[in-house]
Image: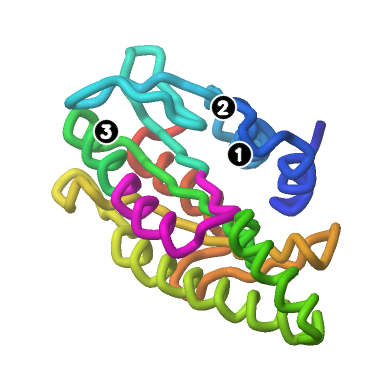
Amino acid sequence: MTYERLQDAMERFRLRPARAANRQLEVQLYCCEELTRRGLYGAEIEKRLPGAYRDKMWDVGRISKTGEVTLGISCKSIISNHAGTVPNRIDDMLGEAVNLHRRWPWAVTGYLFMMSRVDESVDRRGKRNAAIAKGIPEQVVMREARESGDFWFGRLGDSVGEASDRLGPDDFPEKFEVVSCSLLDFDAGPPFPVQYHSLTPDPDEFFDRMVEIHRERFGNT
């Protein structure tokens, strides 16, 4: 399977059950394809990377022939419960980076984040259906739902943007080298319309930068 863009991977992501253990598979494969397309080989999906405090399974990881961790990509999505999940995702993000960078300060880390524009939780869906049943036009209900999603996406992007652009081993370990945040409207596709946060690069720029930094630090290994 070849993915021309993130939206293609997300279409297949949507076909998997919400609680499937391998729901991120399509996005993980997309990441490996994008790295390979740019000449960076050896990245694997579901790669266990040894950290300073514990080993952790990363969505995409790369270990050199000498056993050095050179790259890790964390793929995260928020489909429902925006208000409760956004703060937790930020905390998780910082912990992932610290654990890896404390042991491998030169490792190039990336955080690829996808968020549903409309909160798909049972509670939110029920409230939307109830509002429509009361006579509120569906167009109005969905506009308000998207405005809420835009707000939480902005909060997330502002926060993770502050924890990106790590410059090297002397920079803060909780930061990622590159972060990309995408907002997808699953109620308007496929293909799903997508927006990118102004403080983070789009997926193409994300992988360009990941490979560029990796070459600066590790050459063409």
Magenta residues, start to end: 76-93
Q: Nearer the viewer, residue 133 or 210?
A: 133
Which comes before the other along the chain, label 2 or label 3? 2
Which comes before the other along the chain, label 1 or label 3? 1
Q: Nearer the viewer, residue 92 or 2?
A: 92
Q: Are the residues at dot 1 and dot 3 in contact (C-beta closer than 8 Å)?
A: no
Q: Nearer the viewer, residue 72 or 91?
A: 91
Report the quarter where the C terminus lies.
top left
Report the side of 71 relative to 53 (left or right). right
**Residue 213 percent across, percent down from the top left:** 40, 47
**Residue 41 percent across, percent down from the top left:** 56, 27
| Cα distance between the residues tagged 1 and 3 | 19 Å
Residue at the disc numbered 3: 100
Q: Residues within 10 Å of mark 3 (few under 14, many from 20)?
A: many
For image coordinates 70% across by 82% down, the residue present is 143
Q: Residues within 10 Å of mark 1 (few under 14, many from 20)?
A: many
For image coordinates 71% across by 80% down, the residue present is 141
Residue 54 sits above or below residue 30 on the image: above
Residue 181 sits above or below residue 45 on the image: below
Residue at the disc numbered 1: 31
| Cα distance between the residues tagged 2 and 3 | 20 Å
> Callout 3, which amino acid?
Leu
**Residue 25 percent across, percent down from the top left:** 65, 31
**Residue 154 percent across, percent down from the top left:** 46, 74
Q: Are the residues at dot 2 and dot 3 in contact (C-beta closer than 8 Å)?
A: no
> Callout 2, which amino acid?
Tyr
Q: Nearer the viewer, mark 1 or mark 2?
A: 1
Report the side of 95 relative to 83 (left or right). left
For image coordinates 56% across by 25% down, the residue present is 45
Residue at the disc numbered 2: 41
